[in-house]
Image: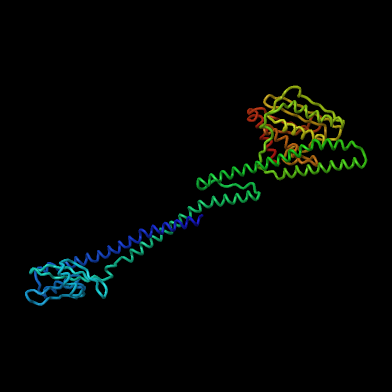
Amino acid sequence: MRWALVKVCLAVTAMVVVAFAVPLGLVVQEMARDRAFSNAERQAATIGPTLSITTDPGQLRKAVESTQMGAAQRMAVHVPSIGGGAPVEIGTTRAGSHAVEETRRMGRAMTARLAGGGSALLQPTALGSGDIAVVEIFVPESEVSNGVATAWVVLAGVGLALIVGSVAVADRLGARLVRPAERLADAAHQLGEGRLGARVPEDGPKELRSAAVAFNSMADQVVELLANERELAADLSHRLRTPLTVLRLNAASLGDGPAAEQTRAAVEQLEREVDTIIRTAREQRAPASGAAGGGGGAGCDASEVIRDRMAFWSALAEDEGREVRLAGVDRTVRLPVARPELAAALDALLGNVFRHTPEGTPFAVDVHDAGDAVIVLVSDAGPGIADPDAALRRGNDGGRDGSTGLGLDIVRRVAESTGGDVRIGRSMLGGTEVRVWIALDDRARGGSGGVRTRRVSRRKRRG
């Protein structure tokens, strides 16, 4: 497109230059000719007063030689026969007698082309006797074309400069149009090759800026959709951990024997496959993804969800001899979180308790309504977490061997979707306490919840 613009501008400028320069050059040529013959007419008129007074050859010769043209031998005077005398020819004659007689007969000036080059101006002049004398002025070709070549060279130079300038301007304008288009095409190729961070600078003409804005918006949506898809795959895979935990615990109680060993081996293999799926999804997720948890749903009753999930996990706890304590779920507590998301977060926390604490370890779930937020505490009497900050880093479950780290990440996304946060510390039971702060309104997001979110962000940067 750039060269096409240059060619179009070159053609248009060349046509304009030709349309103006050629007629202007012809006008200059005609002006030079008119100037030369006007000068010849003035020189011919200088001898007119002498002819009106006398036709004496001697005096006429002196008068002719005294003029500029006569001194340059470019003037001649043709006097006709007067009173039966012979015709008088004074000066260097170049025009033929036929041209002289024709001028005398017509009574007006005329120009005759000479065989040797140049022209002769024949100017009739009336004598005192009533006869017509003819004054001849020789006009060489160099005088007729004086300055014409220079004018043509100047016009050609100006035309060439205009063409070069127009081509340069067209090239700059073309580059201004082409570069944004090339960047847009390059970004499209990069995005097609899987480089999701490809973006286009929003500059250039208005239409290309609009295209760049649309492309960047599309790329952001693609990244978000892919991130949401991978998050969904990871979340769904992680939710398989709940039934896998039950299977593993049940398999452990089967005793010895080939069937029991095969069952336990199958459960372990299934757990490894699920872990692989989760890790792969987490590693491929776009870093810029802001896939939210369940904060945008219709909300749910936290007490009802906790009672439902604890009914499930309590059966497993009884099989393993774990003491369970549940508090704060005797009244309705509405949260701005979708029920499936809150259930997934609870399953992730309780699953971690069963996976990473010995059998018989007690645990507790407490719910506190703080007015502008709801606090959910999951605590146990296990060995605890050595590095709470590392446990909160995305993709790292803080020293709990064999974990993908997605469990706490699911919990944190649910909390942060409302403006809250997650903290890990030591529980009153002596083990780990996971404190989930879920904000209830915009005041919590702008106040304490916002502060907690910034603290979590600083912990993430340190990680």
In the displayed structure, 197 sits above or below 250; it is below
* Left or right position of 241 against 35: right
Q: Residue 148 at x, y = what percent?
A: 31, 65
In the displayed structure, 197 sits above or below 155; it is above
Q: Residue 353 at x, y = what percent?
A: 81, 34
* Residue 348 found in image quarter: top right
**Quick check: can you spot residue 356?**
no
* Residue 414 found in image quarter: top right
* Left or right position of 96 against 235: left
Nearer to us in this view, 68 or 122:
122
Q: Residue 72 at x, y = what percent?
A: 21, 73
Number of disc labels: 0
Q: Residue furthest left?
A: 83
Q: Residue furthest top?
A: 331
Nearer to us in this view, 161 or 138:
138
Residue drawn at (68%, 40%), measured in percent from left and top?
228
Residue drawn at (60%, 49%), measured in percent from left and top?
188
Q: Residue 181 at x, y = what percent?
A: 54, 50
Q: How is the image coloured?
A: rainbow
In the displayed structure, 405 sits above or below 65; it is above
Nearer to us in this view, 373 or 230:
230
* Left or right position of 341 against 12: right
Q: Residue furthest bottom?
A: 86
Residue drawn at (55%, 45%), measured in percent from left and top?
211
In the displayed structure, 66 sits above or below 290; it is below
**Quick check: can you spot residue 196?**
yes
